[in-house]
Amino acid sequence: MDYGHSELNSLTSGFGKYDIAALRFGYAREVELKDGSFAKVESSLTETEKVLGEGKAVKNFGFCTDENAGGSIRCNRFDEGSSATEIAQFHERQYHDNYKYRNFRNGRADFTEWGTAQAISSRNSMFKAARAIYEEYEFYESIFGQDVMEAGCSPEELAKYPICKEINDKHDAIKLVGKFFLDILKTPDLSCALAKKESADKLEKVVTLASLYNDSLKYELTYVPSSCFDPNVKAAFEKDGLIVVAQAGRFFNSVKENNPLYNNESDIAVRGIWIDKLLAMKMLTLRYFGLGMTEDLQGALADVTEIKEELLDYISHITLGTELANPLPFQTEAGEEVLVPYAIDSSYVIPEQASEQVSRYFGLGVINNTKLNQQELKMAARFIQTADLARKDAADAFLKHIGVYKKGITTPFEKTDLQILKHKDYYYAANNENTIAQTMISTAQAKDILGSLNKELITKVLKAKKGIFTIPATFTEKEIMATKVPVSLLGQLLELTRKGVKITEERFITLLGEEMGKNAFAAFGLGEAGLTKIINFIDKEQSAPAGAGSKVKFLYSLDASVLEKFLSNTLDDTIARYLEGIEILPSLSL
């Protein structure tokens, strides 16, 4: 029988489409044809199709047995969708639609912190159903390769090769799944963007609704407001001459209401989404999906280039404090989207849990609060690892990117290729592979060195790092356009050129936007020799000149943001944050 997501998915009789087709065939000996008409089955289906003749074909209904349920994304009970993309859309829609029922008391007599373990189990099952789409993507990738699956088929290829429909379906679906989990990571604590009454178009500050409620409204209301546009919330801000212009996010931690009906210590009105964030990080980095002996591939969503880049961008945000490349928009009361700065920073703290089972599952401190960024890094480091030789290099590279080498104060490092920092009771070390740790260490060491250098030289290097070069007069228009493309992207274009890959300008614009797409297409048209020339030119402009001293070489090794902060006298705050951040990075083994 059919197992629809809800009764609304079934026909008015309560039966699904397959149910009715099976009953019609079994009792009336009729089958539905692809054109919507029906035909009698006098002998067998094969003979019936022969009698019907050309142009008449029996409509096929997808089918799998109870024994196979859960074996693939197309054989699951209580879901929606007939393609990977539709199934991905269903899981995201289900998550968001159920939030107001799942995370709020809504009059339930029993809604407590003790339900967190059950909530984790439920959310983990929901997220695994979405993550399962990667298993099909991974299978196709093992056949057609990473480049084909990440690029998808062009319209011309789609018309020529029937398999391209499946390739593009998996390609589109995996982008949706990756974005779904990444958006959960990037969701802020429910926040209210505020402005002064007299200047409504100028952002004054951003305040979390939980802080407003716990500091003042909790003692005035018997419910927990779920929106910054709640009349009582707006009235509270208006006392300070502020108005709510937009909101974004969901309650990060659980919130207890001031209601005499629910006055037990463990009673809550809202369950926070911190568990969703940790499970989203798990799903993005998970390699072993749990299919037992049939699982001979151990890729992760984080292996998909586009997803990996955005995940590493998020990790840079929670460790280095960099701005998110694609932050979630806030919404006005009218539903319009606006961009408001926000940060997932060290103020996001998971409180001590009532249930030891919850603490054990995530590896939280039993009697202490835990920083969200530290726990997310632990999750990523735990699940990204693999012994699968085909994926080990990618896993190791990811782990090295987010990790740091760490030793006690009595056992200093001996390797000379490491940048080393002494902080509190430990030595921390990093090389070029440890991108985040190296940034922290080099920045902490930068202040004294930068203070001894000429500010004009620092400004010159900063301009070069931002791509502001003195272009040689001999450069053609296409070569000038190519200098505006990031070196990392130029390197990818060079690899594609060597492989003989053909990409249209329209494709570049679709992937990169109008301006960067045109510049990248111009660079791609230069061929291998031309791209090499531009890469060498940019490398030279952004590298220390031959014979430069150690201080100048160090200057050129620094990130542009460090130079900007030094010139604007804000480097001390950054160093303090980095020294705090380096303590939570995953430890690596030499």
Image (cartoon, helix red, strand yellow):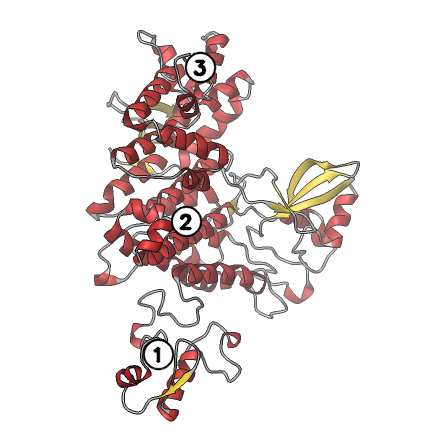
Residue 329's quadrant in the figure?
top right
Q: Pick whichever, 178 or 52, lies toward us.
A: 52
Q: Which residue is mark 3?
A: 461
Label 1 and label 2: CA atoms lie apart by 45 Å
Image-based side of 248 in relation to 589, left or right = right
Q: Which of the marked residues, 1 or 2, is nearer the chain's N terminus?
A: 1
Question: Residue 286's x, y, as percent?
Answer: 34, 51
Mark 1: few, some, or many residues within 10 Å (few <14, many ≥20)? some
Mark 2: few, some, or many residues within 10 Å (few <14, many ≥20)? many
Image position of 437 with respect to 188: above or below: above
Q: Which residue is mark 2?
A: 281
Label 1 and label 3: CA atoms lie apart by 70 Å
Question: Residue 272's x, y, as percent?
Answer: 54, 54
* Element under disc 3: helix
Q: Pick whichever, 571 or 468, lies toward us.
A: 468
Disc 1 versus disc 2: nearer the observer: 1
Looking at the rendered structure, the kind of residue marked 1 is Val
Q: Residue at x 39, y 22 (%)?
A: 479
Question: Residue 239's x, y, as percent?
Answer: 79, 43
Looking at the rendered structure, the kind of residue marked 3 is Val
